[in-house]
Image: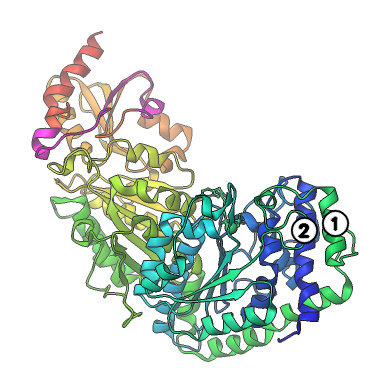
Amino acid sequence: MTLDASRLAPMANAIRALSMDAVQAANSGHPGMPMGMADVATVLYSQFLKFDPAAPKWPDRDRFVLSAGHGSMLIYSLLQLTGYAAPTMDDIRNFRQLHSPCAGHPESVELDGVECTTGPLGQGLAMAVGMAIAERHLNATFGDGLVDHKTWVIAGDGCLMEGVNHEAIGLAGHLKLGRLNVLWDDNRITIDGDTDLSTSEDIAARYAATGWHVTLCDGHDFADIARALAEAEADPRPSLVACRTVIGNGAPNKQGTHNVHGSPLGADEVAAARAHLGWAAAPFEVPTEILADWRALGAKGAAARGEWEKRIAADPQGKEFARRMAGKLPEMDEANAAFAAWLGQSQKVATRKASELALEVLTAAVPEMVGGSADLTGSNNTKTKATGPFSASDYAGRYLYYGIREFGMAAAMNGMALHGGVIPYGGTFLVFSDYCRNAIRLSALQHQRVVYVLTHDSIGLGEDGPTHQPVEHVMSLRLIPNLYVFRPADVIETAECWNIALQSSETPSVLALTRQNLPQLRSTGEMLSAKGGYRLRGATAARKVVLVATGSEVALACDVRDALEAKGIGADVVSMPCMELFDAQDAAYKADLLPADALLVSIEAGVTWGWQKYVGDGLTIGIDSFGASAPAEILFPHFGFSVEAIVPKIEARLAG
Ligand SMILES: Cc1ncc(C[n+]2csc(CCOP(=O)(O)OP(=O)(O)O)c2C)c(N)n1
Ligand SMILES: [Mg+2]
């Protein structure tokens, strides 16, 4: 729909008015960005973006990501004006208030029209890269008839300045994700003031150097914006459109300054802006003709969606596409049978290897799994026969070489999961989870099924030393709400944890896996890991001790138990591959496993902090310092992880 400036200007002013009024009413928020980008957004929505407010989750819609999430009123305005069921005008009146879906920063779990949760600068754009990857992959798999959309991003100076931007655009440029278009709010202002306080980077040159197409426009000239967006759309490379804008455009006395970034304009300036813009309507009211133009624009997407509905109904792959987009797993009977057969074996492998064995089975059974690694494929054991490389020349591939870009990988995986139709998993060393921690947090906050394969999970990695040996990581990841942190003890638990991770469609998972080999401890039982913790060995003599361990320390706990039993001291071993799942069990189950009348002892090659909640004033065996460079067999006893060191401690406590 091509409207001339006389119609577009008042439409853009509706965004400006709603934004300044909502921020004013909340007495907090960011009016500058939505007012500055109102013109660009109006052109995007009126002439370029493919969307249907009546079907916010329509799979072939364009994805729009407001990476500059502080400008949330921009997207809330757009959703309301174009006719989405939510947010309502009342929701907007309650911007930033409890129970309004119009949170301070846009949240994908609050509003169907919000594609991803943004606010942590840089990550929206990086997630958009993942969305563009998913689009190309599904297009290569299902064809143009079902998958043919673009990804549009509005990003600010902050999004471009963050380190993750470098990772994200490097990946996008390399993969030639030409359907990704970033509209940069080039207003030269951030919170502290002018951007020349902190940067003198040639951003256009940087993007061009990573394989992007770069163009620019006057972000307040509708025709020029449309010209630049058309150029971006046509170029086969990912595009950056530098939209030269004035922050807070329309607020006559404050625009162009950092004062409009994150504070209400104030009653006087709001009145002055109304006069300046010729906006006579009361707060939260949009004049009928202007609203009609917006609604007409919203209604036009129904036709394209209708055509698509016809195509999917007629497509032989339509059902499979719908299954994947719904996030439903396929039949897993064969995979389950393969795993059941493992019980009868006695495989002594590292859990990273066990994960690879599980992945061989799972990636063959679940075609939507798309793997990858941040340049540690051979260490993370993430590549399987079923997953060929995903590249600019083969988007059907299911394995991403993310390069040394942990944060970029994690954010891309969030974008892929949010896009839908794929289940991303990716690997790096556990110790580098800190590099991508905020993206892991966003997986959890957004309820996304992303699986982090984090190997080399303790001092057990050996000679690489303390820089590579995680100590606090497993426990600190457990602090993140809605994240399953699995530390499986053997090949059987590893397969179980992988299965749980795949079945958990609203929760991301971390698999903390060993470099070193571990004996197979289980030959019976089905999906015991689903309870988070379970009794692996029962006491023979009268029970005095319960040893609770995870991962590589479960085998040690079994040895400690045997030594105690030989001395007539009865001891159980509880394997606890996932604290979060154990915590969800009922009180009776937990009390049965961790009885009050026994000495409770935790054994984990990580910080002891946190174990007290299970063992009370029992014993916590762990490592509360950094590790050291040496072979693993030397390090474990050196740090007290041996039968010889642990048994006397237990005996002393029992005696004392
Ligand atoms: C990772 C991260 N660091 C810091 C912030 C706090 N913050 C929010 S907006 C902003 C400035 C962003 O500047 P810009 O993107 O140019 O936005 P504009 O002022 O132009 O609206 C900062 C530092 C954040 N949201 N995320
Ligand atoms: Mg800025």
Closer to us: 272 or 614? 272
- On whether residue 611 falls in the magenta region, the answer is yes
Q: Which residues are magenta?
A: 609-635
Q: Which residue is mark 2?
A: 251
In this orientation, does residue 365 appear? yes
Residue density around tag 2, few if under 14, some if 14–19, many if 20 or more, within 10 Å: many
Q: Residue at coordinates 63% horizontally, 64% vertically from top-left?
A: 112
Q: Residue at coordinates 75% horizontally, 51% vertically from top-left?
A: 23
Viewed as shown, does residue 34 lie left or right of 485? right
- On whether residue 100 falls in the magenta region, the answer is no
Disc 2 C-beta below 8 A from ligand 1: no
Residue type highlighted by circle 2: Ala
Residue type highlighted by circle 1: Ala
| SS category of the residue bearing label 1 | helix
Count of numbered circles on the image: 2
Q: Are marks 2 and 1 in contact (CB under 8 Å)?
A: yes
Eyeballing the image, is 575 above or below 134? above
Viewed as shown, does residue 399 lie left or right of 93? left
**Quarter of image, res 480:** top left
In this orientation, does residue 368 appear? no
Q: Position of residue 64 (x, y in %)?
A: 58, 70
Q: Position of residue 457 (x, y in %)?
A: 25, 44
Q: Position of residue 8 (x, y in %)?
A: 76, 77
Q: Position of residue 472 (x, y in %)?
A: 32, 36
Eyeballing the image, is 304 above or below 71? below
Disc 1 C-beta below 8 A from ligand 1: no
Circle number at residue 272: 1
- Label 2, label 1: how far apart the Cα atoms are: 7 Å
- Mark with earlier residue (2, 1): 2
| SS category of the residue bearing label 2 | loop
